[in-house]
Image (cartoon, helix red, strand yellow):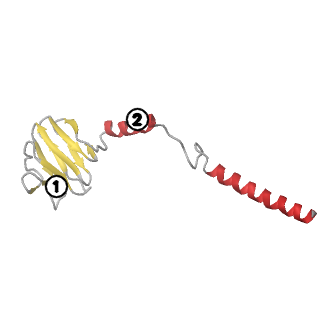
Amino acid sequence: MKRIAAGLVIVFSVFAVTVAAAAAADTPGSESDPVVTKSYVDSQIAQLHSSGTVSDTYTVVKVNAGQKVIGKGGTEIILRSGEATAIDNGANGVSDITAGQDLMTGQRVGMNHLLLVPKEDGRGIQAITELYVMIRGSYSIQ
């Protein structure tokens, strides 16, 4: 009887330790399962948008004369005002979806034309004058 009781105590102890270790590993707020608030997530997304690095909706961006807008793969750019030229990657141009052609470096970007940067390889537009563009996707201004 004492052996059975001792065996049950050992089994129960092992079970309790296992449950406690599993619970500690998945405790909300722990390092392995951090808790964040909606306001924190919203602020991080807003920071990305304001830094000009990513946009999942069209964002109006002012670009000064001489600056470049370099898109990453899948970035869409629409010239709304001002004058700009395309920047190619040395082999392929920026896709002008509206005109159905590739724009190579130096070619003028048409007003209200939808441009698509197919890959992250340095393609985009350069502002001749101050301009406003609508951008959707990841980009940098140089």
User: Is 2 placed above or below 108 here?
Assistant: below
At label 1, the amino acid type is: Asp
At label 2, the amino acid type is: Ser
Residue most toward the right? 2
Label 2 vs 1, first from the N-terminus = 2
Residue 68 position in % (x across, y down):
20, 43
Q: What mark, if any, has residue 138 been given in the picture?
A: none
Q: Residues within 10 Å of mark 1 (few under 14, many from 20)?
A: many
Residue corresponding to mark 2 = 43
Q: Secondary structure at mark 2?
A: helix
Residue 48 position in % (x across, y down):
35, 40
Residue 3 is drawn in which quadrant? bottom right
Foreground mark, 2 or 1, reads 2
Residue 80 is drawn in which quadrant? top left
Distance in Å between CA atoms under marks 2 and 1: 34 Å
Residue 50 position in % (x across, y down):
32, 36
Between 139 and 58, the one lying in front of the other is 58
Residue corresponding to mark 1 = 88
- Identity of the residue drawn at 31% across and 43% down: 53
In the image: residue 13, left or right of residue 46: right
Between 102 and 22, the one lying in front of the other is 22
Q: Residues within 10 Å of mark 2 (few under 14, many from 20)?
A: few
Task: Look at the image and tell me in which quarter the C terminus lies.
Answer: top left
